[in-house]
Amino acid sequence: MGRNDPDPLWAPREFPDDLGVEWDYRQADLLIELAEQVVRSPDTGKPITLMDWQRWLLRELLARHPETGRLRHRVVVVSVGRQNGKSLLASIITLWGLLMQAAEPLVVGIASNELQAGIVYNRTKSAIDNSPELAAMFKKTTMTRGLMTHDELGLYRVLASKGSALQGWSASLALCDELHVMAPEAFDALVIGSGQRMDGLVLGITTAGDESSTLLNRLYESGRNGDIGFFLWAADEGASPDSPDLEDQLRKANPSLACGFQSMEQALSEVKILPRIDAQRYKLNLFVANVDAWLDGIVWENQPHLDKQPIKPVVITIDRTPDW
């Protein structure tokens, strides 16, 4: 029991107010202990050591009410810059969903394509295969048929991000990757299905989107209204790759960078190499106007001809693509 205050060094820009409640973090703490024993780094092969911000977030995501024992949130959105360990967190929460959440768990992983969905699946599978204790709790794992607990009561499947494919899945845990490209009807189907479970949880982990990201814009608004759990690491609004305080802005969007796990030199190099719109979105975790823009808006505004009145008629043409 107690509070779980974040360190100002890496605290998210927006997160739920506790409102004086002392939440129960015991199950989350048990999961953290388990993860640091069985989950291994793909680089070193050694057991991982979670960063402080990751421990804090896991405790927030899995907090339970001290009186009712129910989950603090049923729908949660976590928005953070790329390369901050989102897949690692998702694989750890998958283990929680399979081993701690429910007597007959149904865990589904949703992503825009098979390759992306396989990242979390493979990390979870690796943790199970490399731990004799965990392996004994599951049927022989495969690359294609999902993960099944040994008693055949628990299942983890990877599904396509399509509304029709998700109808009827009463998931105890649904993990959604990159909400900015997910169809609203697919997400809504998961929320409806998980609502049939006592403590069903729908968790979306994403980076910022653009003006066409209908679902993510809606979820940001719901989070800011307090309707869902919402955790946002992002640079200040108006920040850009040209900001004089770029290093500070990068730390705000990338808690792993703020914790010293990532290299600031590398982060600055990536900002310089990436197209401006990608740096804005993936490194500063800020919404952009349009990911398919022919010319960046700020570059257009800085053109010297814009402050002159045209002396000839102006013609604007649009080359429409088939999938516009």
Image: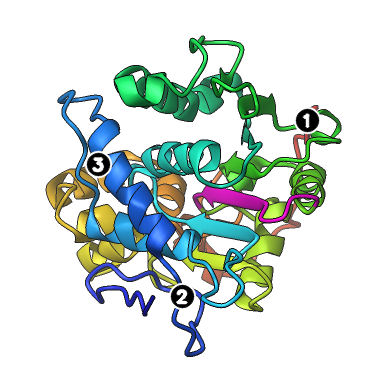
* Residue 281 place in picture, x, y as percent: 46, 52
Distance from Cα at disc 3 to Cα at disc 1: 45 Å
- Residue indicated by mark 2: 23
Say whether residue 231 is left or right of residue 29: right
Q: Nearer the viewer, residue 100 or 160?
A: 100
Say whether residue 302 is left or right of residue 54: right
Q: Earlier in the sequence, mark 3 or mark 1?
A: 3
Q: Residue at x 64, y 50 (%)?
A: 202
- Residue indicated by mark 3: 36
Residue 17 in magenta? no
Q: Amino acid at mark 2?
A: Trp
- At mark 2, the secondary structure is loop
The magenta segment: 196-207
* Residue 50 place in picture, x, y as percent: 24, 48
- Residue indicated by mark 1: 323
| Residue 81 appears anywhere in the view | yes
Tag 3–tag 2 contact (CB < 8 Å): no
- At mark 3, the secondary structure is helix
Q: Amino acid at mark 3?
A: Glu
Residue 262, compared with residue 38, is above or below; it is below
Quadrant hosting residue 226: bottom right
Label 1 packing within 10 angstroms: few (<14), some (14-19), many (20+): few
Q: Nearer the viewer, residue 222 or 313?
A: 222
Q: Quadrant of the N terminus?
A: bottom left
